[in-house]
Amino acid sequence: MSAQVAPADLTLRYPEVGTGPVPTDIYYQPEFYDRELEAIFKRAWLCVGRVEQIASPGDFFVKEIGTFEMSILIVRGKDNVVRGFHNVCQHRGNHIELEKSGNCQLFRCPFHGWAYALDGTLAGVPDAEAFYDLKREDKGLPTVAVDVWEGFIFINLDNAPEQTLEEFLGQQGRDLAGYPFHLGTNTFEYEGIVNCNWKCMIDSFCETYHVPILHKRSIIDTLAGPDNPFGRVLDVRFKAPHRTISVVGNMAYQPNPVQGLAFQYAPGPSITSGSVDEKTTLPKGLNETRAENWSIDVQAFFPNWLIVIGSGMYFTHQMWPLGPNQVIWQMRGFLRPATNAAMRFGQENSMVELRDAVLEDGNTLERIQRSMNQGLIKEFVYHDHELALRLQHHTVVNWVADYERRFQSVKR
Amino acid sequence: MSRLPAEFASLDHFVDDWVLSDSRARSTKRFGSDYGEVREFYDQMLAVAPAVLEYLSARQLGDMDEPDERLLKLMLSLAEIGPAIEWYEEVRVKDAFPPHRFTLTQQIPDCAAQE
């Protein structure tokens, strides 16, 4: 075992999470799922996109939040301020914008033509004099709290968020700030629906104990390799409610022929290359132990957003629950620009290898969920280096309990 | 007129099957091909790939003629089928979530200039 792979006993750093088995009931109980939506998804800041998607005044995109069947309109105003609105006409409730993205000066509802300015105010009503006591100032688009961190746009479905985005992202947000996220201008996105709990899907990307087995045909030699036969991590850090997993890279990895050519012509090291771009200055929170055999971090932002990040590219996973047993899985890759045509080949290989590797991850999820639903796995016992999964369980349970203690007792 | 740059005319017999519209079409092609066909494409492409990449590294996205674009698209197909040969030794991803349930909703254009 390489001396540079973390020893056991990471878990003991966080005595509050214990070392015992963890019950699986929160992964399938419909009643707990309902409580999660109220306590977590209606309170936490949720990432919905990047500022580059709305670079100019009047640019907008519509984000469908499948979890709540909500349609959210994100707009850059004439004053350059990024705002969020429910995409709901205040006349009869139709959606005012049906395109996924675009640029406009006025949103006009395609039902009766009510028009809204970029700041959400009601700007026009056809045949307005035929309404009784219409108070335009009360009929603006319903606002959604929006803030931006490092170019990522977040919303909060709580009308009066308890924490600012900065407070919510806390130490993990501060420690990752400064990474050149804006260089990942060339994006691709995959999406699918998986019949598993949202937390089950997040778990699969938050440990590498599975790498030597599940990924034995693909990324085993880049992220594990002979010095790390059991897929140990470099580090797991809990910056509540968020978590970072630092992943080993095998610096002696010899790529396959096509892969090697792709690495040579990629605009930055691929996630699957196990190598590092020496020119990128890493922020404090990325490879925080400054290990020499580092490849990537998984920076898990509570509740449903993971940035898998290397020195040359990054991608995000986002999980939008549709029910206790179903989730929308969105994976978005951010690649640096190709400065010549050969680099387009490197980009394509980065995308394809990433997709193939995560398809391997995805194959376990529906089986795990069925096992839990059938009561055949009532608890999880976690390897020390599966600590990030234990931390998620701890955080979810505490977040729900905290919310119910503080708010539901008041209501009763 | 050759469909590819003259120095790579030996790859012309791949143009009909492996010059495809976009990333989505390339993955459909890979997962629907038989392994022998993919293997033949891999072997012949790999033999010239270093020279092709050197050629393409002197070309700019958004400013290429059609033969150059076709050549790049052949290389993008090579990128798609690389793991089929180098990881799985079959066209599909072994023991995988079904690819048709995890689909590209946004793609990087093949030949357009990038910022």
Image (cartoon, rainbow, N blue to C red):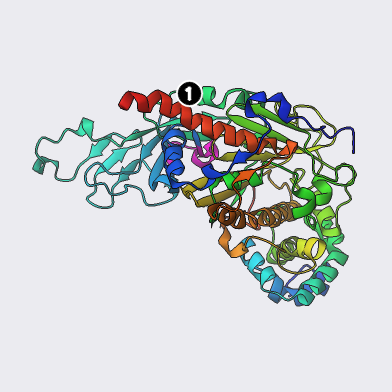
In the image shown, does B41 or A380 lie closer to the viewer?
Answer: A380
Asked whether the viewer can see residue A98, the reply is yes
Magenta range: A47-61
Asked whether the viewer can see residue A316, the reply is no
Figure quadrant of the C terminus of chain A? top left
* Residue A363 pos. (x, y %): 65, 58
Figure quadrant of the N terminus of chain A? top right
The residue where tag 1 is placed is: A164
* Residue A319 pos. (x, y %): 54, 46
Residue at point 81% right, 34% down? A278
Residue A56: say if magenta: yes
- The correct choice, above or below, for A351 with respect to A269 in the image is below
In the image shown, does A234 or A24 lie closer to the viewer?
Answer: A24
Q: Secondary structure beneath disc 1?
A: loop
Residue A199 lies left or right of residue A37; in this view the side is right
* Residue A309 pos. (x, y %): 69, 39
Given the image, what chain letter belongs to the residue carrying mark 1? A
Instruction: Classify mark 1: residues with Cα within 10 Å, few (<14), some (14-19) or many (20+).
Output: some
Identity, as a three-letter code, of the amino acid under mark 1: Thr
